Image: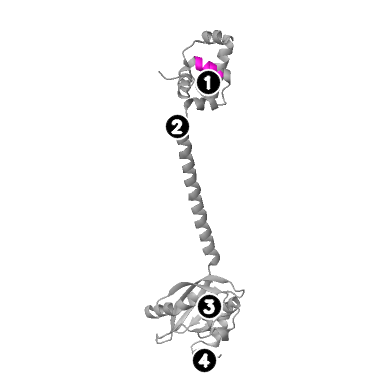
Amino acid sequence: MSIDAMGGELTADMVRALDWVPTIIWVAAPDGACRLVNRAWREFTGRRLEDSLGEGWLAAMHPEDAAAWPGQIGEALESLKPFSVECRLRRRDGRYRVMHKSGEPYRDEAGNVLGFIGHCVDVTNHKQALEDLRKASEKHRSVLSNLKDAVAVIEDFLRTEEPSALAHRDDRLTPRQREILHLIARGYATREIASQLHVSVKTVESHRAQLMQRLNIHDVAGLTRYAIRTGLVPTD
């Protein structure tokens, strides 16, 4: 089809120039019919120029987007302002790619609108990256929520667990150390503990020092409070 058959305003030099542009360029009549698509569009879709003119280019669009195009171009003609839409364009391998389609009116010397000229940019990867980020964010929120629930369960468990069971599970202490801690908490002096357990005073003192180190407690009062809290001795 000749340039004259497409309307006369597009010169041969303009057509050749648009073919050198690596971005997809399109030119449409005021009613949205295709007047020109450049080489980038034809290589992307695998369709010839002759098959794309008029309503022919709609065959390369997703059916839903092709059906929406007349209304979109009608709004653009009414406002006579630049516009942008998203559409799905079928690549030559048969896969649809999401395109950001922008256009604006072009006029003759008298200011009459001759149609619209615009370009398309493939934003499929960008949209997929945003979707992946959204899913990752949702997963992160889910993990945090589950973690908070787990912490709450553990806290409830620790609050309701029998103190004696806690003391029984404290594997930082040997049976002998628990015996000595029990007697310390009951107010026995070092010599009394040594006599009752049939060990030397130095042994009792050594065990007491180890208790303080392992429990990170620095005085006898602290040892007593720990023994009461864990149920080694009953509260009065």
Question: Circle 3 is placed at which residue position?
Answer: 25
Q: Is residue 131 above or below residue 46?
A: above
Q: Tell me the SS state at disc 2.
A: helix
Question: Circle 1 is placed at which residue position?
Answer: 212
In 3D space, how far apart are the residues under numbered discs 2 and 3 (Cα atoms)? 71 Å
Q: Quadrant of residue 47?
A: bottom right
Q: Tell me the SS state at disc 4.
A: helix
Question: Circle 2 is placed at which residue position?
Answer: 160
Q: Residue at x 47, y 34 (%)?
A: 157
In 3D space, how far apart are the residues under numbered discs 1 and 3 (Cα atoms)? 80 Å
Question: Circle 4 is placed at which residue position?
Answer: 5
Relative image position of residue 216 (x, y in whole percent): 52, 24
Please tell me which of labels 2 and 4 falls first in the chain. 4
In 3D space, how far apart are the residues under numbered discs 1 and 2 (Cα atoms)? 26 Å
Q: Tell me the SS state at disc 1.
A: helix
Q: Amino acid at mark 4?
A: Ala
The circle drawn on residue 164 is: none
Please tell me which of labels 4 and 1 falls first in the chain. 4
Please tell me which of labels 1 and 3 falls first in the chain. 3
Q: Amino acid at mark 2?
A: Thr
